[in-house]
Image (cartoon, rainbow, N blue to C red):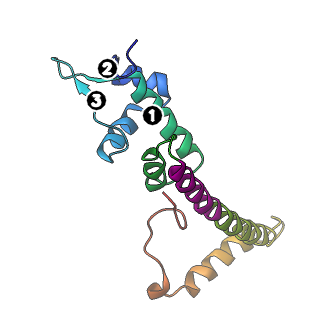
Amino acid sequence: MDNHAAQYRIGEASQQSGVTTANIRYYEKEGLLAPGVREGNSYRLYSAADVHQLRFIRLCRAMDMSLDEVRTLLALDLGRKEDCEAARNALDDHLQHVRDRRAELQALEADLQALRNRCDGSDTHCHIIEALHARADAQSLTALPVASGPGKRHV
């Protein structure tokens, strides 16, 4: 069987790879996957190699790699020694991100636990909500970052 012969419609490629059809289209748009070949009826067709690439992308994303990190790894050739160094460097960078994020999450956990410990439910009002309102009042609008998701999102 030709590993590059288009044989799967997008739904089948989704089932084979574990990547949603919406994400397959998104990965095509982002250049992580070549657009599927179109049949005469305009259905996209994907090869076994495409399904493997989708699995590779899913695996990298499950390890919290950004699209740029995945793009870097996809561009590497496993037969070139120079690319092995590039892969190690990419993973070293990602490991540092994970370590930084772990430290941020540990600080967040301690903060949440301290906040939780403010109230045992026995008082006439909730000290957790009181503390949250006090923090909100203490924030300056000019000091607040623009909300774009949770924390320093990596992806």
- Looking at the image, residue 73 lies above or below residue 138: above
User: Of helix, strand and loop, which one carries label 1?
Assistant: helix
**Mark 2 vs mark 1, CA separation in Å:** 14 Å
For disc 3, the neighbor class at 10 Å (few under 14, some 14 to 19, many from 20) is: some
Nearest to the eye among marks 2 and 1: give it. 2
Q: Which residue was labeled with disc 3?
A: 36
Quarter of the image where the N terminus is located: top left
The answer to the question of whether label 2 and label 3 lie on touching residues, with beta carbons closer than 8 A, is yes
Q: Say what amino acid the circle numbered 1 marks.
A: Leu
Residue at image position (39%, 39%) is 23
Please report the bounds of the magenta region as a residue range: 81-97
Q: Say what amino acid the circle numbered 2 marks.
A: Ala
Q: Residue 6 carries which label?
A: 2
User: Of helix, strand and loop, which one carries label 2?
Assistant: loop
Q: Which residue was labeled with disc 1?
A: 54
What is the residue that sits farthest to the left in this orientation?
Answer: 40
Of 72 and 108, which appears nearest the observer? 72
Q: State the image coordinates of residue 122 (x, y, percent, origin top left).
A: 84, 66
Q: State the image coordinates of residue 104 (x, y, percent, origin top left).
A: 67, 69
Of 132 and 54, which appears nearest the observer? 54
Q: Say what amino acid the circle numbered 3 marks.
A: Gly
